[in-house]
Image (tube, rainbow, N blue to C red):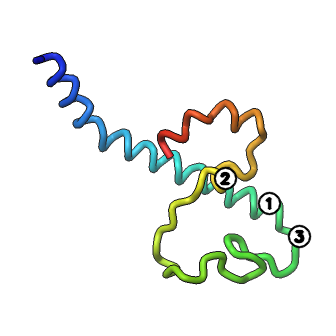
Amino acid sequence: MRERLENNDSRVALQPFILAERNRMLLRQMRRIRDEENELMKGVAGWETGTLYGEPVYHTTDPDEWTEPTLGELWTHASEKNIKERESWAFWV
């Protein structure tokens, strides 16, 4: 019983660190996607990163409001091999 209690306390104590690491990884991936979109679309006239030809994708949300990305959005530019390797990451995202 004491060991189970200690393990539970450890898990609770580590949870904020795990969440912070998850958020850091999420933001790094989103930056990679943004940079790739900038590189890919640099020759397209009128293209603004994060929009669809200058129109916001989300019309009903405040521009300052956080919208949680889906797994599909996070792995847009990834190869099929990388997606398969990282399927277990769905737990963290």
Could you tell me which secondary element the residue under label 1 belongs to?
A: helix
Q: Position of residue 28 (x, y in %)?
A: 56, 50
Please state which of the two labelled residues, at mark 2 or mark 3, is closer to the viewer. Answer: 2
Residue bearing mark 1:
39
Please state which of the two labelled residues, at mark 1 or mark 2, is closer to the viewer. Answer: 2
Residue bearing mark 3:
43
Q: Label 2 to label 3, Cα distance in Å? A: 25 Å
Could you tell me which secondary element the residue under label 3 belongs to?
A: loop
- State which quadrant residue 85 falls in: top right
| Labelled pair 3, 1 in contact (Cβ < 8 Å) | no
Residue 72 badge: 2
In the image, residue 25 above or below residue 61: above
Q: Position of residue 71 (x, y in %)?
A: 61, 50
Point 68% across, 55% down: residue: 33
In the image, residue 58 above or below residue 14: below
Q: Label 3 to label 1, Cα distance in Å? A: 9 Å
Q: Residues within 10 Å of mark 1 (few under 14, many from 20)?
A: few
Tag 3: amino acid: Gly
